[in-house]
Protein backbone atom coordinates (compact mmCIF):
# COMPACT_ATOMS: atom_id res chain seq x y z
CA UNK A 1 0.00 0.00 0.00
CA UNK A 2 1.21 3.51 -0.76
CA UNK A 3 0.11 6.65 1.08
CA UNK A 4 0.81 9.98 -0.59
CA UNK A 5 0.65 12.85 1.86
CA UNK A 6 -0.60 16.27 0.76
CA UNK A 7 2.01 18.93 -0.03
CA UNK A 8 3.28 20.80 3.03
CA UNK A 9 1.90 18.24 5.49
CA UNK A 10 3.60 18.93 8.85
CA UNK A 11 6.13 16.30 9.90
CA UNK A 12 4.18 15.80 13.14
CA UNK A 13 1.14 14.64 11.11
CA UNK A 14 3.28 12.33 9.00
CA UNK A 15 4.71 10.80 12.18
CA UNK A 16 1.17 10.18 13.51
CA UNK A 17 0.28 8.25 10.36
CA UNK A 18 3.54 6.28 10.52
CA UNK A 19 2.98 5.33 14.17
CA UNK A 20 -0.61 4.26 13.44
CA UNK A 21 0.45 2.10 10.48
CA UNK A 22 3.24 0.53 12.52
CA UNK A 23 0.77 -0.24 15.32
CA UNK A 24 -1.26 -2.18 12.73
CA UNK A 25 1.78 -4.34 12.00
CA UNK A 26 3.16 -2.66 8.88
CA UNK A 27 6.69 -1.57 8.19
CA UNK A 28 6.76 2.00 6.89
CA UNK A 29 9.26 3.30 4.35
CA UNK A 30 9.21 7.10 4.06
CA UNK A 31 10.26 8.85 0.86
CA UNK A 32 10.55 12.63 1.10
CA UNK A 33 10.29 14.51 -2.18
CA UNK A 34 10.33 18.19 -3.00
CA UNK A 35 6.51 18.42 -2.97
CA UNK A 36 5.17 15.21 -1.47
CA UNK A 37 6.01 12.65 1.17
CA UNK A 38 5.21 9.07 0.23
CA UNK A 39 4.77 6.31 2.79
CA UNK A 40 5.22 2.80 1.47
CA UNK A 41 3.67 0.13 3.66
CA UNK A 42 5.09 -3.38 3.79
CA UNK A 43 3.23 -6.24 5.37
CA UNK A 44 -0.38 -7.31 5.72
CA UNK A 45 -2.40 -4.23 4.81
CA UNK A 46 -5.73 -6.08 4.74
CA UNK A 47 -6.53 -4.73 8.24
CA UNK A 48 -6.21 -1.12 7.09
CA UNK A 49 -9.36 0.71 6.04
CA UNK A 50 -8.24 3.31 3.43
CA UNK A 51 -11.10 5.64 4.41
CA UNK A 52 -9.51 6.10 7.84
CA UNK A 53 -6.29 7.38 6.28
CA UNK A 54 -7.96 10.10 4.25
Image: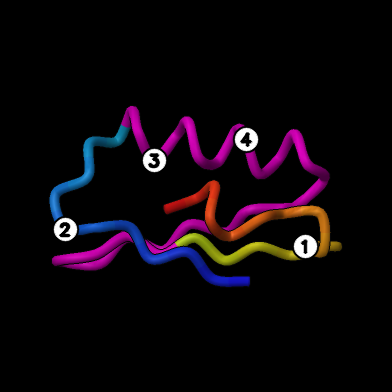
Name the residue nearer the viewer: 52 or 29: 52
Quick one: SS at disc 1? loop
Mark 3 — residue? 14
| Lower sequence index among marks 3 and 2 | 2
Q: Is residue 35 left or right of residue 25?
A: left
In the rendered view of the protein, which quadrant contains the N terminus?
Answer: bottom right
Q: Quick check: marks 2 and 4 in contact, CB under 8 Å?
A: no
Q: Is residue 42 left or right of residue 4?
A: right
Residue at horizontal 63%, vertical 53%? 28
| Lower sequence index among marks 2 and 1 | 2
Quick one: SS at disc 4? helix
User: Any mark on residue 7, and which?
Assistant: 2
Instruction: State how far apart marks 3 and 4 are (Cα).
Output: 10 Å
* Highlighted magenta segment, given as a residue range: 12-38
User: Any mark on residue 45, and which?
Assistant: 1
Q: Quadrant of residue 13?
A: top left
Mark 4 — residue? 20
Residue at horizontal 24%, vertical 58%? 6
Mark 2 neighbour class, 10 Å CA radius: few under 14, some 14 to 19, many 20 or more: few
Name the residue nearer the viewer: 38 or 50: 50
Residue at horizontal 22%, vertical 45%? 9
Residue at horizontal 15%, vertical 66%? 35
Instruction: State how far apart marks 1 and 4 are (Cα).
Output: 12 Å
Amino acid sequence: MVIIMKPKTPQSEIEKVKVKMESLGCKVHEVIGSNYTVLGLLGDTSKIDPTHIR
